């Protein structure tokens, strides 16, 4: 296949998989919002948003280093499995220190839902490890098959759970269904990767795993900083504002973050090719084309979702506030799309240390702004701060990338 065909095939495969997962989850979100109301949806959002950061944390930047250094895949699988177990126990321990309330904070029901869903972190880690091998071989279609299998089971079980009139019973059933779907996806992906590889040697090379871990730390710190500033607004909302506001912002944010997988998938397909072209004249030209695609896609996304936003109010009148929140968030699409390209371009050039500084500074500013404005102005402040923070990330990373490319061009 040509370079363009490879990118299109693997990006398309990821999009199909995401349509299956996000489509099923989004459909269930709509049903929960419509059947149980904004307060119950807020409780449901608290459960999912607590687990989501730990999902991402299990990545730990290992995949990018695995692709650069060509470590044995088995070392990656066992290292991430160990990290996922540690992260799961950490998430459980942290829950005990978070405030509990009835109108805000983590209620007893929310805590129960979180405990049920916690094991999903481990199986998400298996999927992430399998995806590293699929990315290396440019066979994301196999990941898509696993995602469709898990999503189908999740959707069928959720539809059964939604027949319950009690929101506590219904949401508990949905969370359990999501866990089962994640287990099926993770195991299916690992089995598919093993078959593609042909052999799977169960051999723990501690030195190799420690080297992989240490080389992943700069990127891991970048991802952690990015994760904190991307999620801290939800956390502060949960602690300082009524559950209804968590539900209103949660629905808008669900759509917003769903769209943001598009540049991620595109860069997943592009990254192995970027690594191959680093240090060659073709790198700048390839990067320019990548940026153009991301920018045009971001503008198209802004137009589509700006006019589609009022549909949220049709779900239930309680969610009318989600329209304004979504419209603010989508204004940041150009920042998020382009910063994704800039980040992976810098990673391909092994400039992870610079990314740590950029995302660390942005995280501190984001936390300060959220702590100051959210308690007084609520979810709309959270939306504006989100796009301001990402605009800063793009400005700084774009400046560094331009300087790096210009210096190499001169040399």
Image (cartoon, rainbow, N blue to C red):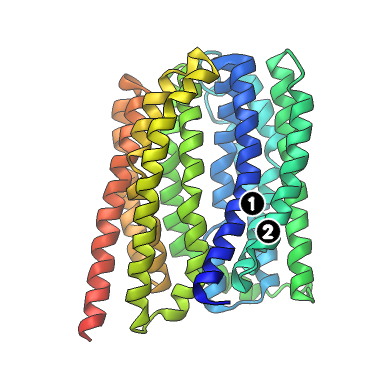
Q: Residue at x 77, y 48 (%)?
A: 184
Q: Give SS at disc 1.
A: helix
Numbered tag placed on residue 258 in the rendering: none
Asked if residue 371 is positioned above or below residue 210 in the image, the reply reads above
On screen, residue 108 above or below 350: above
The Cα atoms of the two marked residues, 1 and 2, are separated by: 7 Å
The residue that appears at 71% across and 29% down in the rendered structure is 174
What residue is rendered at 31% in x and 36% in y? 385
**Could you classify mark 1 by the number of other residues whose Cα lies within 10 Å: few (under 14), some (14-19), or many (20 or more)?**
many
Q: How many dots with numbers?
A: 2
Decide if residue 265 is in sight here. Answer: yes
Q: Nearer the viewer, residue 195 or 334?
A: 334
Farthest bottom residue in view: 411
Q: Quadrant of the C terminus?
A: bottom left
Q: Is residue 153 left or right of residue 49?
A: right
Percent x, y for residue 366? 32, 40
Q: Which mark is residue 17?
A: 1
Q: Is residue 236 visible?
A: no
Residue 240 at x, y percent in the picture = 42, 21
Quarter of the figure with the N terminus: bottom right
Q: Quadrant of residue 210?
A: bottom right
Tell me the number on the disc at residue 143.
Answer: 2
Residue at far left of view: 410
Q: Nearer the viewer, residue 57 or 250?
A: 250
- Residue 24, percent across and down? 66, 37
Residue 204 in the image: state x and y as whole percent.
73, 72
Tell whether 186 sits left or right of 103. Answer: right
Judged from the image, the secondary structure of the residue bearing numbered disc 2 is helix
Q: Are marks 1 and 2 in contact (CB under 8 Å)?
A: yes
Whichever of callouts 1 and 2 sits on the residue coming sooner in the sequence is 1
């Amino acid at each position: 296949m040509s370079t363009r065909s490879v990118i299109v095939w693997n990006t398309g495969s990821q999009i199909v998989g995401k349509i299956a997962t996000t489509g099923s989850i989004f459909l269930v979100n709509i049903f929960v919002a419509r059947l149980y109301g904004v307060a119950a949806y807020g409780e449901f959002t608290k459960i999912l948003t607590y687990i989501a950061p730990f999902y991402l944390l299990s990545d730990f930047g290992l995949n990018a280093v695995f692709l650069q250094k060509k470590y044995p895949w088995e070392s990656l699988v066992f290292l991430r499995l160990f990290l996922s177990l540690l992260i799961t126990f950490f998430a459980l321990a942290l829950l005990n220190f978070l405030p509990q309330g009835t109108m805000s904070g983590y209620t007893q029901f929310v805590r129960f839902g979180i405990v049920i869903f916690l094991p999903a972190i481990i199986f998400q880690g298996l999927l992430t490890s399998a995806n590293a091998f699929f990315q290396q071989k440019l066979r994301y279609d196999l990941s898509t098959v696993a995602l469709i299998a898990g999503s189908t089971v999740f959707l069928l079980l959720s539809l059964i759970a939604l027949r319950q009139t009690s929101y506590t019973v219904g949401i508990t059933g949905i969370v359990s269904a999501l866990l089962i779907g994640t287990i099926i996806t993770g195991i299916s992906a690992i089995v598919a990767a093993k078959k593609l590889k042909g052999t799977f040697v169960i051999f723990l090379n501690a030195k190799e795993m420690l080297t992989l871990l240490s080389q992943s730390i700069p990127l891991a710190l970048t991802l952690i900083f990015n994760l904190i500033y991307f999620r801290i607004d939800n956390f502060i909302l949960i602690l300082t504002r009524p559950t209804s506001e968590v539900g209103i912002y949660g629905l808008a944010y669900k759509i917003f973050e769903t769209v943001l997988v598009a540049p991620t998938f595109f860069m997943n397909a592009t990254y192995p090719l970027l690594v191959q072209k680093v240090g060659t004249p073709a790198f700048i030209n390839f990067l320019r084309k990548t940026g153009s695609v991301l920018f045009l896609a971001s503008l198209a996304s802004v137009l589509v979702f700006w006019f589609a936003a009022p549909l949220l109010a049709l779900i239930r009148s309680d969610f009318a506030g989600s329209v304004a929140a979504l419209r603010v968030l989508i204004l940041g699409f150009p920042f998020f799309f382009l910063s994704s390209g800039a980040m992976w371009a810098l990673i391909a050039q092994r400039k992870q240390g610079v990314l740590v500084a950029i995302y660390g500074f942005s995280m501190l500013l984001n936390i300060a702004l959220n702590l100051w404005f959210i308690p007084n102005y609520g979810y709309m402040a959270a939306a504006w701060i989100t796009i301001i923070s990402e605009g800063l990330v793009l400005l700084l990373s774009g400046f560094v990338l331009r300087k790096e490319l210009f210096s190499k061009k001169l040399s």
